Image (cartoon, helix red, strand yellow):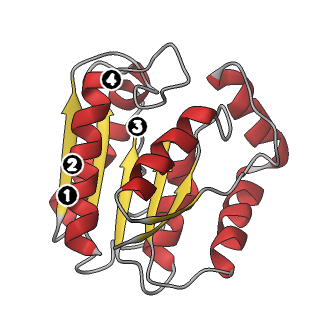
Amino acid sequence: MSEILLFHHALGLTEGIEVFADGLRDAGHTVHTPDLFEGRTFGSIDEGVAYAKSVGWDEIMDRGRRAAEALPTGLVYAGFSLGVVPAQLLAQTRAGATGALFFYSCLPPEEFGAWPSGLPVQIHGADADPFFMDEGDVDAARALVAEADDAELFLYPGDQHYFADSSLPSYDAAATRLLMERVLGFLDRVG
């Protein structure tokens, strides 16, 4: 089984993130869900991103690093949207990563140096999500798939950014079931 460090999106640590983590736990995995926003949640992506900017991206990444410090090195790093930033940073820079899962976002692999040799990664996004498709994330994901030894990009039909968060109106149950099936297969393979 895998041990996963899972970072939330710009709305904060929502009930839907915890439900997703519980689905992984129910499959036998250990999942840590640190709160990068120190208890704050937001009603819109803009509000959450504004908060992250106000504390600084470096601080958000440092909060991610601090969350990892007390954990073993053999982790799968996972993140939803904004949470991909610390997840990708740690996957690329903290020794011992066993995998990476990026939901709704991806940074260019060179952002944190070369992608580690042999580190498996999955990237998941909606094929008409304006954030994922129009802001460079899908291009970064395609570049990562081309660079990495073991990388997969999955696109789901729809235009919702947070489609796997069951606590939000954007939730897509069918897409989330398929996403979870793929994620569990990945975790079984890398765990």
The first of marks 4 and 1 along the sequence is 4
Secondary element at tag 2: helix
Q: Which residue is mark 1?
A: 185
Q: Amino acid at mark 4?
A: Ala
Query: Which quarter of the figure has residue 145?
Result: bottom left
Residue, disc 4: 173
Of circles 4 and 3, the one toward us is 4
Q: Which residue is mark 3?
A: 104
Q: Which quadrant does the C terminus fall into?
A: bottom left
Residue 184: x %, y % from top left = 26, 55
The foreground one among 132 and 42 is: 42
Image quarter hosting the N terminus: bottom left
Question: Which residue does the image show at 41% across and 78% down from the upper left?
Answer: 97
For the residues marked 3 and 2, what is the alpha-carbon distance in whole angstroms?
Answer: 15 Å
Residue identified by numbered label 2 = 182
Pair 3/1: label in front: 1
Asked if disc 2 and disc 1 are in contact, CB closer than 8 Å, the reply is yes
